[in-house]
Image (cartoon, rainbow, N blue to C red):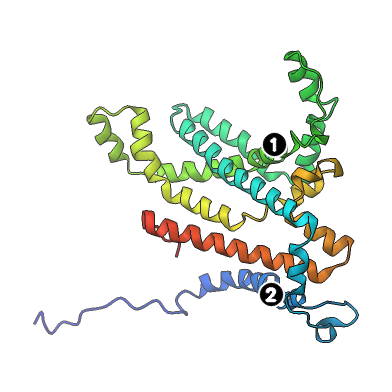
Amino acid sequence: MAQNKRIKRPKKKGLYNTRELHTMLIPAVIFTTIFSYVPIFGLIMAFQNFKPLMGFRESPFVGLNQFRYIFTMPSFKTAFLNTMIISFFKIVLSILVPLILSLMLNEVAKSWFKRTVQTIVFIPYFFSWAILAGMILEIFAYDGVVNQTLMHALGSEAKAFLVSNKYFRTIIIGSDVWKGMGYNTVLLLAAITSVDTTLYEAAQVDGAGRWKQALHITLPGILPMVAVLTVLGLGNILNAGFEQILIMYNPTVEKTVDILDTLVYRLGMVSHQYSAAAAMGLFKSIISLFFVGISYWILYKKSDYRVF
């Protein structure tokens, strides 16, 4: 009798059963298609001597001439090196600083203090660069807070931070880390809460202190989140912060903070060399794709971690 009973199997979830979820995806798919995939066809400009009045069809095809032109530009090497340096320190510090902060907050027993610190460090993330740049430029101005208080207290003369190639790159990197520090800290704290608490109890039985627990349990537990942040950072390694630098920089510090994005801006919007700007944008995308592929492959080989 038992064999004759029909075993009810769960119905497979088809497209109809998940229609609500797919409906919610439609705006994102439309947005991504219009603003991310349709513009790909415009990359043909990188292989043309594009003239706006002639359009894509009538503009002459020049092959790789635009790429040869941008690689021989005197400002290309400087912009490329500045982009790599600024991006490297932004990626490293934007992970390292929130990681240290999240580990320290995890050790705080007072929940009100932890929430207060999280709120304070998260606030800059909600401000646009137009607001933050104005604040930073006022703070580091020759008659700003830093020169009037800190430098005066140290007995040092006032310094022109905003027109000095020695200091301005550090201000750019530090302000970017400050802006994103709260967001990454919250992500890492959320990852810490997902670590199995029985591991801490077993470690305490074995006599492990807080430092060893953080080193051997917490850090390995949040390694996947650190890996995701690293991969996302490497994908944007040639995006050193166009909006921030365009607002904050001035010609006197162009030598140390001029990046590929600001060079593309000058080529396209100031010099009207649209094809050269498109060629440089395509070059950036290829390099970024290379770094994402390499970082993903390393993570898969070393820690068996997969994003997809």
Query: Badge 2: how crowded within 10 Å, few (<14), some, or many (20+)?
Result: few
Q: Which residue lies furthest to the left in this view?
A: 1
| Image: 147 above or below 61 | above
- What percent of the width, then of the height, locates residue 196? 32, 44
Q: Left or right: 179 with respect to 3?
A: right
Q: Residue at x 78, y 67 (%)?
A: 69
Compared to 112, does 271 lie above or below?
below
The quadrant in which the N terminus is found is bottom left
Residue positioned most to the right: 53
Q: Which of marks 2 and 1 precedes in the sequence?
A: 2
Of 167 and 241, which appears nearest the observer?
A: 167
Residue 98 at x, y = what percent?
54, 39
Q: What residue type is disc 1 on?
A: Thr
Residue 76: x %, y % from top left? 75, 57
- Residue at 46% of width from left, 28% of height from top? 108
Query: Callout 1: helix, strand or loop?
Result: helix
Q: In this view, does 184 lie to the left or right of 252?
A: left
Q: Mark 2 points at which residue?
A: 40
Label 2: which secondary element: helix
- Tell me the mark number nearer the camera, choosing from 1 and 2: 1
The correct choice, above or below, for 228 with respect to 206 in the image is below
- Mark 1 to mark 2: distance in Å? 35 Å
Q: Residue 26, located in which quarter of the rendered image? A: bottom right
Image point 61% across, 36% down: which residue? 121
- x, y percent for residue 279: 74, 69
Residue visible at 43% across and 29% down? 107
The residue wearing badge 1 is 170
